């Protein structure tokens, strides 16, 4: 079996990919109707971004 | 306590033989076994638990989500924990990784160069792999609940 091609992602790219994949999975598992799913996915994605960037800024003073 | 329509509290009624029970109650054991089978199938192959219940959209999304996380995590040379861990965190990581079912073994097979967590990418990959396992466990639990007839 062949090995996978190496992937190099920046922190932000990995963060966005993670948030998008998990939000979509949560949306489909947590809601039934397509409209509800889209709303849930967008809301979940937004919260991932908000919390992730918020924690990033909260840690900023400790990096100096 | 809620009395039944004939006015006797349920706790004071004599137990009925199995043959006298309504069919849905007689099949309780069977449906429970089916629910566990669905959960096991969902763990072994991400999305299969939902596919067996004809929840095609959910099955596809679970399969793709777990697959993407495993492929990206392994491509970033994340750490796939084994059962030979040295501490509790390794054991927890192994449980999380193993949650991906067959994809865990697939990732072990394709990650031939081994993990490299000396750079940030490898560390992100480790998180992707653990998340894939935990997400698949969540999906298997969801499929189990759906098979039991709970709202899902």
Image (cartoon, rainbow, N blue to C red):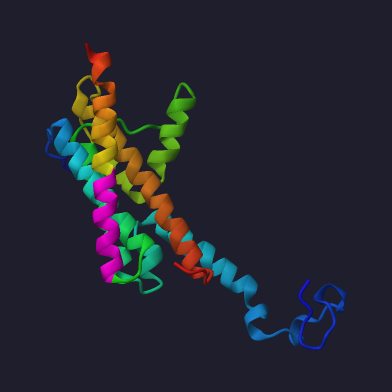
Visible residue check, residue B35: yes
Who is closer to the viewer here, B130 or B3? B3
Whether B127 is among the magenta residues is no
Who is closer to the viewer here, A42 or B79? A42
Q: From this view, report whether residue B8 is shown above or below residue B129.
A: below
Image coordinates of residue B74 in percent, x first then y, are: 23, 38
Visible residue check, residue B70: no
Q: Residue at x 30, y 35 (%)?
A: B127
Quarter occupied by residue B70: top left
| Quadrant for the C terminus of chain A in the image | top left
Question: Which region of the structure is painted magenta?
Answer: A34-47
Whether A39 is among the magenta residues is yes
Quarter occupied by residue B42: bottom left
Q: From this view, report whether residue B116 is shown above or below residue A13.
A: above
Q: Residue at x 35, y 69 (%)?
A: A32
The rendered magenta stretch, by its main secondary structure, is classed as helix
Left or right of A5, for residue A28 = right
Quarter occupied by residue B16: bottom right
Q: Residue at x 31, y 62 (%)?
A: A28
Image coordinates of residue B66 in percent, x first then y, are: 29, 50
Image coordinates of residue B55 in percent, x first then y, are: 35, 71
């Amino acid at each position: 079996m062949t090995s996978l091609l190496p992937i190099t992602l920046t922190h932000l790219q990995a963060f966005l990919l993670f948030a998008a994949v998990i939000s979509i999975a949560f949306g489909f598992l947590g809601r039934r109707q397509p409209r509800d799913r889209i709303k849930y996915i967008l809301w979940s994605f937004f919260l991932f971004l908000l919390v992730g960037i918020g924690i990033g800024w909260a840690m900023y003073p400790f990096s100096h | 306590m809620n009395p039944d329509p004939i006015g006797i509290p349920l706790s004071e009624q004599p137990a009925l033989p199995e043959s006298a029970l309504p069919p849905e109650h007689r099949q309780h054991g069977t449906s429970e076994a089916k629910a566990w089978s669905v959960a096991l199938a969902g763990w072994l192959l991400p999305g299969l638990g939902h596919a067996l219940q004809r929840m095609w959209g959910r099955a596809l999304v679970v399969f793709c989500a777990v697959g993407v996380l495993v492929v990206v995590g392994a491509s970033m040379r994340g750490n796939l924990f084994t059962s030979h861990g040295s501490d509790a965190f390794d054991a927890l990581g192994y449980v999380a990784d193993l949650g991906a079912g067959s994809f865990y073994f697939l990732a072990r097979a394709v990650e031939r160069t081994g993990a490299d967590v000396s750079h940030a990418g490898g560390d992100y990959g480790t998180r992707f792999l653990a998340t894939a396992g935990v997400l698949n466990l969540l999906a298997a639990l969801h499929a189990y609940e759906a098979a039991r007839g709970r709202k899902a």
